[in-house]
Amino acid sequence: MEKGLLFVVSAPSGTGKTTLCRTMARIFPGMHYSISYTTRPPRPGEEKGRDYHFISAGDFQRMIDAGEFAEWAEIYGHRYGTSKTILEKTRDEGRDVIVDIDGQGARQLRDQDPQAIFIFILPPSWEELKRRLSLRKTEHATALEERLRKARLETADGRWYDYIIINNKLDKAQEQFKAIILAEHCRRERVIGVLETMLTGK
């Protein structure tokens, strides 16, 4: 069985990456959308197991010590991590995995798996990003400015990703994301075995 592909998606907060990732998981039924573990408390409307696996700082540290994370990072004073077991098990089943993480975690996964596909999501403008973050009403003014400052640093990181999607119109961004997934499954190195079988007649 062919191993599933790993799609790693990063973007500044408020860009819409989570919406895009969840949409891809619906479009491609076999795709697994990885839910991160975090020490951050739930925001209004968030559910355990759907948005994040919310755990204590002590439990998170125990998972680090046991080597249970494929990647983890500290962001705004809270820790976030991706389960190594879930990634490996799902991909070994031949299913693709999509991971929604920040640039720190993405670099860790790049070092572990150079064959993973890295996608960066951009807002159409800084003004639009600020508007989207303001509409969320989850941070006070100082925290909002900090997120915008961090967004500029994260955007500079986008240079090393394989693909960049500008999320101006959601339906267009979804089609571009879908095209990337389909194209990656058609790469020569992924289907060379089928080609060789056709040529040899075996």
Image (cartoon, helix red, strand yellow):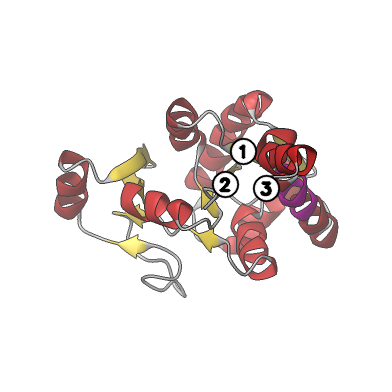
Q: Residues within 10 Å of mark 2 (few under 14, many from 20)?
A: many
Q: Position of residue 174 (x, y in %)?
A: 77, 58
Above or below 42: residue 191: above
Picture quadrant of residue 196: top right
Disc 2 + disc 1, Cβ < 8 Å:
yes
Residue 10, magenta (yes or no): no
Residue 122, can we see it?
no
Q: Amino acid at mark 2?
A: Leu
Please tell me which of labels 2 and 3 falls first in the chain. 2
Amino acid, disc 3: Lys
Sequence-wise first label, 3 or 1: 1
Residue 114 image position (x, y, % from top left): 53, 28
The amino acid type found where label 1 is placed reads Ile
Residue at the spot x=49%, y=55% of the render? 139
Task: Determine the CA span between mark 2 and mark 3.
Answer: 33 Å
Tell me the element at label 2: loop
Q: Which residue is mark 2?
A: 5
Q: Position of residue 186 (x, y in %)?
A: 76, 44
Residue at 28% from the left image edge and 54% from the top image edge:
39
Q: Specify the label residue 117 is tagged with.
A: 1
Q: Position of residue 146 (x, y in %)?
A: 51, 38
- Tell me the residue that label 3 is attached to: 130
- Give yes or no for contact between labels 3 and 1 (Cβ–Cβ under 8 Å): no
**Residue 163 in view here:** yes
Quadrant where the image shows the C terminus: top right
Range of the magenta residues?
Answer: 178-184
The residue that appears at 58% across and 27% down in the rendered structure is 153
